[in-house]
Amino acid sequence: MNRHIINPRTAIIFTDSRVSLDSLHNPNTHAFLVEETRQKVASLEKNEWKIMFSWVKAHVGIHVNKLADRLAKEAERSEGTNYEFNKIPKSFLYHEAAEEAIQNGKPNGQHATRRQQQNNTSQQSRTD
């Protein structure tokens, strides 16, 4: 009978980011935003809230997902936003370095180590 009654202290957070969900559920992930989210969820749960996360497929015409994307972009551009995020996860930096290496013609996205760069510099000076 009561299975259709929704607890007013239940929040379901839908996301199209599997990476975000995986990060939240991985106890070895300690990125700043992941930890912030975990702390907020724990705080809400202490106050008898039930917080659930659910994945939705992106770019398939789900109206609410498109609306959420639009609202997020508007919030990001709004002048009233005074939250600065200056802590970049290492994984992002590694990804960016790999992308740059691919663009610079390195095989498999490998980026040169400092020693390789030094060897290349010393070899060039010998041939000059």
Image: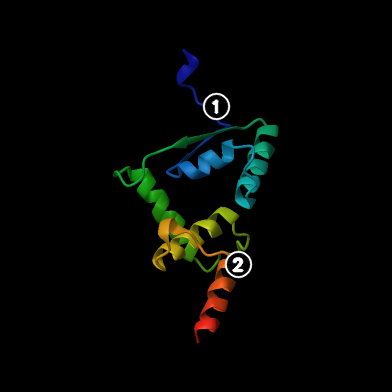
Residue furthest to the bottom in view is 128
The residue closer to the viewer here, 102 or 122, is: 122
List x then y, in percent, for residue 28: 64, 40
The residue closer to the viewer here, 63 or 123, is: 123
Give the class, few, some or many, for how many residues have Cα within 10 Å of label 2's Cα (few <14, many ≥20).
Answer: few
- Pointer 1: what residue? 7
Q: For the point 61% across and 45% down, which residue is it? A: 37
List x then y, in percent, for residue 72: 46, 55
Q: Quadrant of residue 16?
A: top left
Up the image or down, 113 lies above or below 39; here it is below
Considering only order in the chain, which callout, 2 or 1, is on the residue closer to the N terminus?
Answer: 1
Residue furthest to the front in view is 127
Q: Quick check: 60 left or right of 31?
A: left
Up the image or down, 9 lies above or below 3; here it is below
Residue furthest to the left in view is 61
Real-space CA distance between mark 1 and mark 2, rounded to the nearest whole angstrom: 60 Å
Residue 126 visible somewhere in the drawing: yes
Q: For the point 53% across and 65% down, which residue is it? A: 112
Kind of residue at disc 1? Asn
- Name the mark on residue 115: 2
Helix, strand or loop status at disc 2: helix
